[in-house]
Image (cartoon, helix red, strand yellow):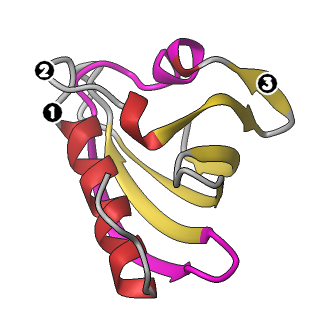
């Protein structure tokens, strides 16, 4: 994992995470995840968290803010669903990262599902 010491480093880390999502199934999200992820108040393993992603979906970052001091990221995403429908949904999401810079908490709201 690269050293993360600035807000821009954290944004680059997040962009790499989104790139890994877009490369599934030929990539893994595990380097970006804690051992347990609290997703909207539901505890998930990395495998369970991974299953939340509709296969073939393409994620685009519309806006992203990061605080390396607080280990937090906020983002607006557009997601082209990989279910063949051609639909695009929007996600407003906040992340809290742990000591190893893995995602340990996610607050997510999706529009248009």
User: Horizontal and vertical percent for residue 31?
Assistant: 38, 36
Q: Residue at x 67, y 49 (%)?
A: 108
From the image, tell me which residue sits under label 1: 23
Label drawn at residue 43: 3
Q: Earlier in the sequence, mark 1 or mark 3?
A: 1
User: Horizontal and vertical percent for residue 73?
Assistant: 56, 69
From the image, tell me which residue sits under label 2: 26
Residues under labels 2 and 3: Cα distance?
A: 25 Å
Q: Residues within 10 Å of mark 1 (few under 14, many from 20)?
A: some
The answer to whether 47 appears left or right of 69 in the picture is: left
Residues under labels 1 and 3: Cα distance?
A: 25 Å
Instruction: Give the image quarter of residue 86.
Output: top left
Magenta span includes 55: yes
Q: Residue at x 63, y 55 (%)?
A: 99
The answer to whether the residues at label 1 and label 2 have Cβ atoms under 8 Å apart is yes
Q: Is residue 57 above or below residue 67?
A: above
- SS category of the residue bearing label 3: strand
Q: Residue at x 29, y 37 (%)?
A: 21
The quarter of the image holding the C terminus is top right
Q: Earlier in the sequence, mark 2 or mark 3?
A: 2
Residues under labels 1 and 2: Cα distance?
A: 6 Å
- SS category of the residue bearing label 2: loop
User: Horizontal and vertical percent for residue 69?
Assistant: 65, 83
Q: Residues within 10 Å of mark 3 (few under 14, many from 20)?
A: some
């Amino acid at each position: 994992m690269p050293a993360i010491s600035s807000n821009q480093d954290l944004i680059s880390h997040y962009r790499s995470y989104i790139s890994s999502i877009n490369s599934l199934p030929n990539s893994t999200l595990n380097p970006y995840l804690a051992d347990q992820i609290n997703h909207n108040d539901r505890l998930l393993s990395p495998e369970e968290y991974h299953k939340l992603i509709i296969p073939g979906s393409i994620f685009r970052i519309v806006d992203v803010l990061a605080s390396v001091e607080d280990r937090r990221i906020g983002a607006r995403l557009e997601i082209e669903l990989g279910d063949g429908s051609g639909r695009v949904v929007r996600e407003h999401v906040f992340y809290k990262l742990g000591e190893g810079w893995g995602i340990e908490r996610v607050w997510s709201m999706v529009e248009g599902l």
